[in-house]
Image (spheres, grey):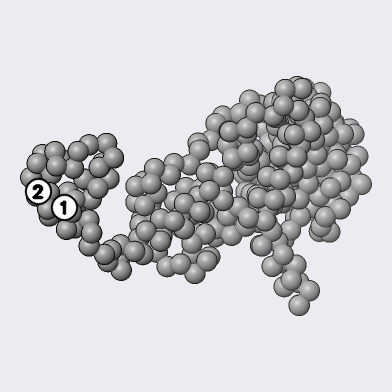
Amino acid sequence: MSEKFALIDAERANFEIKMMCRLLGVSTSGFYEWWHRPLSDRALRREALKIRIEEEFAKSDRTYGYRRVHAELGRAGIKIDDETVRDLMREMDLVPVQVKKRRSLTVADEDAGPIPDLVKRDFTAEAPGAKMIGDITQIDTGEGPLFLATVIDCFSKSVIGWSVDTRYPARLVSAAIDMAAGRITLPEDAIFHSDRGSQYTSIEFGKTLDKYKIRRSVGRTGICFDNAMAESFFGKLKTEMVHHRVFATRAEARRALIQYIEGFYNPRRLHSGLGYRPPLEVLDEWFDNQSVA
């Protein structure tokens, strides 16, 4: 009976209450008695949870699914199972934006010499900077494209280096490596892995890696899975940052990129591969443990 009353309550702005009661076979007086009855403790908690879930969903810029919302609630000390979170999000019609396929910028250098694949699709590492991956993507603006190169740490999943430019020559990816090396002390025999794009196989980029004693690694031409971690990050960025934005200028896009990487992704975005923790939390914890040891 209460389910029918709840349906009438949900639709009372659209249909006459008396008519709905007649169609559902319930009394109008019974509905009003139910409607004026104080909410139970369970109903009050459910409404409070819905408010908190909507807050977490909004904080993620409408990008979190029920698993990450559930993880955020757990980190805040709120005990609730993930299926309840999913049901409440469905009830509130909170649907995260979907990943859209991006256009590849890879132009393979046919003259590049043999470079090994030192990663073999294993995007894990024992320490920060031991294994890094990178790629380039394009952000469209009203002034023309802006290109972003990234360096992602396989240990913490954090973007430890990035660079933007109006073109994407070798210096773009070299600048991202310079930032990464300036942020953390790279261990001996560190690896940087990418696709076989001409920027990454260039002599100029090779010199940058040699400067920091980083070993170069590349995947096979046209095999996106060989650089899947970088592809995954750009999928998230395009979905979570670009899906609802139209950038009038390159400067506006650059500010949005900085906000996404340094203001959301690194310090706040929960990563399933880290046990639903943000990358910087994992990175800081590792360095804290090293200083204590």
Q: Label 2 crowding class (10 Å Cα cut-off): few <14, some 14-19, many 20+? A: some
Q: Is residue 119 above or below residue 72?
A: above
Identity of the residue furthest to the bottom in this view: 292
Percent of width and height locating residue 232: 60, 40
Asked if the residue at tag 2 contacts the one at tag 1, i.e. Cβ–Cβ closer than 8 Å, the answer is yes
What residue type is disc 1 on?
Phe
Q: Quadrant of the C terminus?
A: bottom right
Give the SS element for disc 1: helix
Give the image quarter of residue 243: top right
Label for residue 26?
Answer: 2
Residue 92, percent across and down?
A: 38, 46
Amino acid identity at mark 2: Val
Image location (x, y in percent) of residue 72 = 52, 59
Quadrant position of residue 187: bottom right
Q: Which residue is mark 1?
A: 31
Q: Is residue 233 visible?
A: yes
Q: Nearer the viewer, residue 99 or 11?
A: 11
Q: Is residue 290 left or right of residue 36?
A: right
